Each structure stands twice: as structure tokens, then as C-alpha cells.
Amino acid sequence: MSLIRVLSLCCCMLPASLLAAEVQIRILDQQGVPLADAVAELQQAQPQANLSAQAVKPAEVAQKDLTFVPFVSAVQKGTQIEFPNQDKTRHHVYSFSPAKVFELKLYAGKPEAPVLFDKAGVVALGCNIHDYMQAFVYVGDSPYLAVSNNDGLVQLTGVVDGQYQLKVWHPWQDAEQPTVAVTVPAAAVIEIKLPVTRQEKPQKPKKGFGNSYN
């Protein structure tokens, strides 16, 4: 029996949980320009308990230079997020979003406990002290989700082979987008166009009279 044949038989005997692939998704706007800060989530057509039971890693949304960093986060349901304040001034972080209502009253440094995001949905973050501060946390049901980089690219690793629905979201999108059927492993980079109305992301205010900037 040839070596190639032996390797093929070994692969067939591996449990499905070990047959995993990397999926690359490129997200563009309606003009074909790469779109950063977009979330891609692969949702199983027939969810399996072993995937939802995977360990969920903690995450962090910092306040730095009077902005939230990162602007968009993507986490699985059940994730605990820390909100460290790295500025000299104090912040008052809150959300009124149905997926997570919470409030971290005026504080410096690191809050005593992280915030548990236990419901899928989009959570808009704000600061009661600095009205322009804004960020978003996308909470997904699936462990296969991530945020696009400046090239519009999302890389999902360790994706179990199978049938999925691809969901894409961006805070500036013009309308909710339908899901797209995806088979993993995918033969090539999956390209998605997402109509958006581009805006400027929140930035640290310029130094000047009457401005708080540290």
C-alpha cells in the first residue's frame, strides 16, 4: 500500500472535530474598497453541542486617548470583557443595548470585575463623560467570528468542516444583510460586498481651549 493511500485512510479515520480548516473572507464596500471593522461569523447550519461548549476566552475593550480600543470587537456569547481605563481622566462606560445593559460608573484604572456578555446581538458602548466616544461589541453564537483588518480580510482558523451560514455586520451598514451559504473547507477567499455609508471613527479631540484631552 502506498504512503499516500495510508495517509488518506488515516485522515478518513480522524473524528470530525479534528478536521478543521482556515477560512478567509474579504469584505468590501459597494465600490469594491476593502472595509475594516466588519464582523464575519460562520454559523453552523445544524449546530453541534461540542462547538458551543468550547472554552470562551476573555476579551478587553480599553479606553485610551479618550477613545474605545478597539472600535469594533467580536466575541462569542458567554465572554467576559474587561474595560481598563488607560487615560488620566475618568470614564463612565455604559450600554443600553438589548443584548447587554450595563453601567460602569465613573472610574479610573481597572474595574473590579469584567462584564459578562451572555446574549447574542450588537452592543453599542458609550461614555457619559465624553459623548463622542463610541464603540461596538458584536456578540455571536458561534466560536467562528472575527473582525476585518484594514485590507477587509477576516481569517477564521480551526473551522470544522461542514455547512455554514455566513453572517456579516458593520456599524455603518445601510441595511441588515442576508446570510450566505458556505461550505468548509472553502476553495478560495470568500468575497462579500457590504453597502455602507462611511463615517469617521471616533478620534481623540484636538488640544485646545475648553477641551479635555488626557
Image (tube, rainbow, N blue to C red):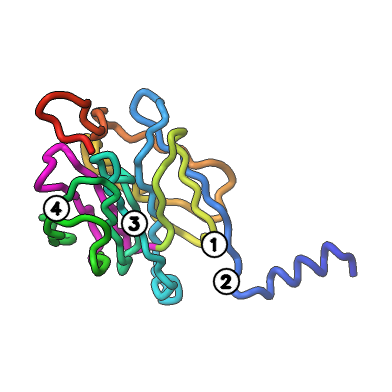
Where is residue 134, by image quadrant?
Answer: top left
Q: Is residue 169 visible?
A: no
Q: Secondary structure at mark 2?
A: helix
User: Residue at left 57%, top 71%?
Assistant: 16
Tag nearer the camera, 2 or 4: 4
Give the residue pinned by disc 2: 16
Label 2 close to label 4 by CB (< 8 Å): no
Q: Residues within 10 Å of mark 3 (few under 14, many from 20)?
A: some
First in sequence, mark 4 or 3: give its number. Answer: 3
Give the camera-side residue of 84 and 194. Answer: 84
User: Distance of mark 4 from mark 1, alpha carbons?
Assistant: 43 Å
Nearer the viewer's eye, disc 3 or disc 2? 3
- Extent of the magenta region: 118-142
Is 207 left, or right, of 62 in this rendering? Answer: left
Where, quadrant-wise, is the N terminus in this rendering? bottom right
Q: CA distance from mark 2 to mark 4?
A: 46 Å
* Disc number for residue 92: 4
Which residue corresponds to mark 1? 161
- Residue 60, label in figure: 3
Sequence-wise, the earlier of marks 3 and 2 is 2
Residue toward you, 141 or 164: 141
- Three-letter amino acid code of the residue under disc 2: Ala
Q: Position of residue 154 (x, y in %)?
A: 46, 45
Among numbered discs 4 and 1, the one appearing first in the sequence: 4
